Image (cartoon, helix red, strand yellow):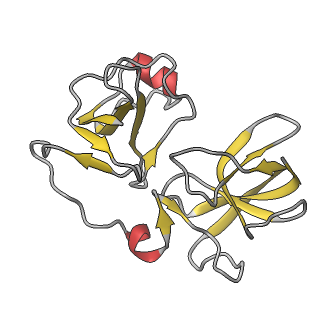
């Protein structure tokens, strides 16, 4: 995909379309489109240092112009020309401490225990299922609360072959607090 990487604030229309609220601070922002000129996806760096990708993709987004980077076949973003006044940053503390994939901390050890330093907060329940989404780790699932139809993603089941009654941990990119999600069914 073609990309435009910039340090900028999202305008009001973009913020409304991607559910980032009214935060108009300057942040590293990535707009993606395939091919160039199509409506783009917009993501931006969050407070934890991971990129926030809204569920809404191209709806209401402006067309991608002035591409200065691209993603490869593994969805790794590569900048063609360095941005003026920027430099590579060292890994963030959570990136050095926890295994992660695409800015999502992998919460469970191979033995199915929550990694030391992470915490489960709150409690939700509902059905979970696998889905194909290029921007999320393959071990992630989408979970839906059957009462409110609210969903959480990504969620990481404690074991890969999950079933009703199992526990999942759901969180945003780079966040060390995970919502405790009790899986009621598999879809």
Tell whether 154 sits left or right of 185.
Answer: left
Occupied quadrant, residue 156:
bottom right
Q: How many marks?
A: 0
Residue extending farthest bottom: 111
Tell whether 76 sits left or right of 153.
Answer: left
The quarter of the picture where the N terminus appears is top left
Residue extending farthest left: 84
With respect to residue 49, does 63 lie above or below? above
With respect to residue 171, does 10 lie above or below? above
Residue extending farthest front: 73
Tell whether 181 sits left or right of 55.
Answer: right
Q: Who is closer to the viewer here, 132 or 27?
A: 132
Residue occupying image coordinates x 50% and y 46%: 135
Q: Position of residue 153 (x, y in %)?
A: 65, 47
Q: Position of residue 121 (x, y in %)?
A: 70, 60
Tell whether 97 sits left or right of 5.
Answer: right
Residue occupying image coordinates x 83% and y 58%: 182
Q: Position of residue 125 (x, y in %)?
A: 84, 51
Q: Position of residue 176 (x, y in %)?
A: 55, 64
With respect to residue 50, does 3 lie above or below? above
Residue occupying image coordinates x 46% and y 57%: 102
Residue occupying image coordinates x 69% and y 65%: 120
């Amino acid at each position: 995909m073609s990309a435009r990487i910039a340090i900028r604030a999202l305008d009001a229309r973009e913020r409304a379309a991607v559910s980032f609220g009214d935060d108009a601070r300057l942040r590293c922002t990535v707009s993606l489109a395939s091919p160039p000129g199509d409506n783009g996806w917009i993501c931006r760096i969050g407070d934890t240092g991971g990129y926030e990708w809204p569920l809404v993709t191209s709806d209401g987004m402006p067309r991608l112009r002035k591409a200065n980077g691209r993603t490869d076949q593994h969805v790794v973003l590569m900048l063609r020309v360095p941005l003026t006044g920027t430099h590579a940053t060292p890994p963030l503390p959570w990136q050095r401490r926890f295994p992660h994939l695409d800015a999502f901390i992998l919460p469970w050890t191979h033995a199915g225990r929550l990694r030391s330093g992470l915490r489960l907060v709150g409690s939700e329940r509902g059905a979970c299922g696998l889905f194909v989404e290029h921007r999320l780790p393959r071990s992630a699932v989408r979970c839906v609360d059957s009462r409110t139809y609210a969903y959480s993603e990504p969620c990481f089941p404690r074991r890969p072959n999950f079933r009703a009654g199992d526990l999942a941990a759901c969180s945003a990119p780079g966040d060390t607090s995970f919502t405790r999600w009790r899986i009621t069914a598999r879809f």
